[in-house]
Image (spheres, rainbow, N blue to C red):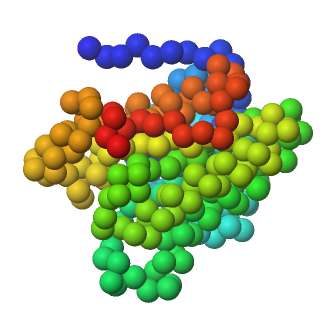
Amino acid sequence: MMAAFATYPSLAGKTVFVTGGASGIGAEIVRAFAAQNAHVGFVDLDSNASTALVSELGSDKVAFEICDLRDIAALKAAFKALQAKLGTATVLVNSAARDDRHNWQDVTPEYFDERMATNLRHQFFAIQALAQGMIDSGGGSIINMGSNSWWEAGGGFPAYATAKAAVHGLTRTMARDLGPHRIRVNTVVPGWIMTERQKTLWTSPEALERHRERQCLPDLIEPVYVARMVVFLASDDAAMCTANNYMVEAGSI
């Protein structure tokens, strides 16, 4: 039976920007906001997936720009292009990340820096690029995507886990700095979410069974449930929620 999800009237007509919106969790977030009648702009590096998502949802509400988020100048230019199409964003979802596995013994300074650029640095500069528009608009909501990998002391990707742990510090400090302008900043913390990437690269019957044993709930987590938390935090229903972590991990910590 398909879940009947909530509609948030406060999101209708709002402009929302999402990073990494072409696939996985990001694409579900784009779909969720489009279903709320928001105007959604997203940035991604995958042109084919981006085009397919806009075709699915309709170009009257959803637009994209191709962008390598490691290039901050390109990120800022992409946001300006989306703003010209959709208006000033009052919601930002920093969703883009890659959890590539790596052995701690093989990590070079160059690889470590690249992991920070891929998983952390763009979140700050996306906030920096869009916060003034939110200030001018009287407020906004910023949702940063964390991970429960470091909460669980997960191994096999130390640079990724370090970047994701730092997201929580970014959320807390920016919530303090932007709070006087009625801009809320929160972190959504997914557990092991069953995106196509995860299914292709990391899942096996044995790994899934071990993970189920760690969760309080028996069901594997689909991306839509992360998206539902994000749209709640973007809505006026969450007007007094800021500087906090919102877990979507089926009790697996």
Q: Is residue 108 above or below residue 129?
A: below
Left or right side of 195 for 93: right
Give the residue displayed 40% in from the left and 82% down from the top. 107
Residue 180, percent across and down?
Answer: 85, 38
Residue 154, relative to residue 194: is it above or below? below
* Camera-side residue of 186 and 73: 186
Residue 68, image x, y percentages: 57, 65
Residue 191, image x, y percentages: 36, 44
Please tell me which residue lies in front, 43 or 93: 93
For image coordinates 45% across by 17% down, the residue present is 5
What residue lies at 26% left-to-right and 29% top-to-bottom?
217
State the residue in front, 243 or 56: 243
On the question of residue 53 being in view, the answer is no
Question: In which image quadrant can residue 175 be found?
Answer: top right
Question: Which quadrant of the rendered structure holds the C terminus?
Answer: top left
The residue under the point 16% across, 51% down is: 207
Q: Quadrant of the N terminus?
A: top left
Along the line of sight, the residue nearer the viewer: 95 or 179: 179
